Image (cartoon, helix red, strand yellow):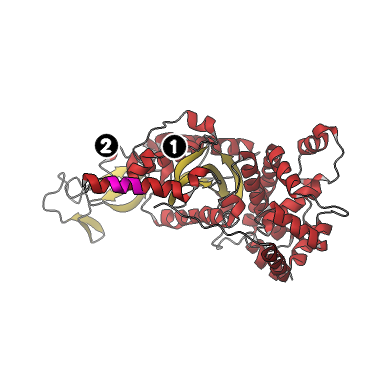
Amino acid sequence: MFCLTNFEELSFVDQISDLNALLQKEPVKILELLQENFDISTFIPDSFYNSFYSDLGRDRRFSLESVLSALIIMHLFRIPSTYLLWVFLTFSHDIRYFCRLSDRVPDEPFFSRFKSSFEVQIAELFNNMALKVNDICKEIDEALPSDSPDKGLSSLLIYDTSGAKPAVKENNPKTLVSEINKQKSFARICNNPDFNPYAAAYKNMPKQSSVNPSIKLDFVNGHFGYFYKFGMITNGFGIPLRLHFFDSDFYSSLNSDFDSPEDQKYEFDNASLLPVVKPFLDSLPLNNFTSFLGDSEFDSYDNFSFLKSSGFEKVFIPINPRNTKDSIKSYDLDGTPICPVDKSPFIPDGSCRGENRSFRYKFVCPKSIRVKGKWTTTCENPCRETNSTVTNYIYPHQDFRLYPGVLRSSDEWDKTYKIRASIEREFASMKNNSLVSSPKTFKLETIRSDIFLCAISKLVVVILAHALNNPQYLRNLSQLVKHAA
């Protein structure tokens, strides 16, 4: 249940080997494509220039474009440290030329100070690029043929949460394991078969890191640990469009005492939807998103009400049993009416809308069969008297949470909800970079900057794929380079 992570220290020889391996992957071709089709200066906001060049009133030896280009290269090639970035810049003339670095190369402390000092401006740069990429995705979507499986992906909005696992003392495996062993010893002494040592360990562990209250004990990536959590929005293509980090201000308004980590994760994730999605929608000049996808952690009447008022026609969020009230016990978790006797689901029979009547879905008794085109019940004790079969109607407009524009038991739901996996793949791709998954610092400004820069590198690939007219590779840089070679 708890994760033990092994870290490997790279020697200088290993770093040079990594550099040689990088050269074998034709980075020169990547640099040439970027130089011809991507200009970072067109996305840098004026406020970033003003902050960078006015800092302490000193002349800058390195231009803002040069520093950002080096950091983007760092994340494109998943270089795991600023020191190794310095090695690459020192030994590679081609990378230095692309970054417009001539006589000198910034040292490691310079890059570290840059990320911690200009985190807000890096976030603004990401938001600028995300708006452009959103337009590119709409353009790609419109150009797709009507029978393409990717048609309509630009109109899907997907949201989920994840977390970085900083190098704080609470994430030391010894700290976690010692507490578990202590609870296991207690379980043997009290001889209680119902005692759960893992749950007891969770209750006894501090709920936040001593260095920063925003680094919380949570369940992320399949294990417990102390994480700095953030929310991410993507479209149906899986392209990151918004990042939002959860700090102490967010947690201060929420409950802090939970019986289980599952309850904590549900409440934290559920409360995060509104403060992440609303600012993103407000930043769009025109909301082109018609459907929302999320997992069951976001199931609540408040969230469904917000999404409906925001203009989403369909919301694909499974009902969470933890949030199921007694008022819907006559329905299953798909919103389908169930038999009051054996709880089996009714059979869907399409939709109907009579004259001057509301749109509604029709369901018939689960023990019904069609005889000469008409439903007939085979139930020996039908719920009510009828000449054919027991019929039930549901009216979607009466409860958007139960009927969010699409039936949960329908083929459309099954087909569309699978697309939510694209955000999971994007998280996995970002966390292939150790700067995102396991930062070696607990300085939150640096962690945020690295995550923003990693997302920026993803947007660069989209811009490059669009410029080269190869939209099928908008999430795969290596295939894009091979195709362009």
Task: Measuring from the top left, give residue 302's x and y in whole percent.
Answer: 43, 33
458 to the left or right of 46:
left
Look at the image and give the residue range highlighted in magenta.
181-186
Rounded to the nearest angstrom, the CA distance separating label 1 from label 2 is 32 Å
Q: Residue at x 56, y 59 (%)?
A: 150
Q: Residue at x 68, y 40 (%)?
A: 116
Q: Which mark is first along the chain, 2 or 1?
A: 1
Q: Nearer the viewer, residue 252 or 335?
A: 252
Residue 123 location (% of width, % of height): 67, 41
Which residue is more in the foreground, 301 or 392? 301
425 vs 36, left or right, is left
Badge 1 is on which residue?
207
Whether residue 152 is visible: no
Quarter of the view holding residue 46: top right
* Image quadrant where residue 19 sits: bottom right
**Is 297 covered by the magenta stretch?**
no
Q: Quadrant of the C terminus?
A: bottom right
State the image coordinates of residue 280 (x, y, percent, origin top left).
Answer: 60, 39
In this rendering, position of residue 275 left or right of residue 382: right
What amino acid type should be assigned to the residue bearing mark 1? Lys
The residue mark sitting in front, 1 or 2, is 1
* Residue to which mark 2 is pinned: 326
Residue in front for this viewpoint, 100 or 181: 181
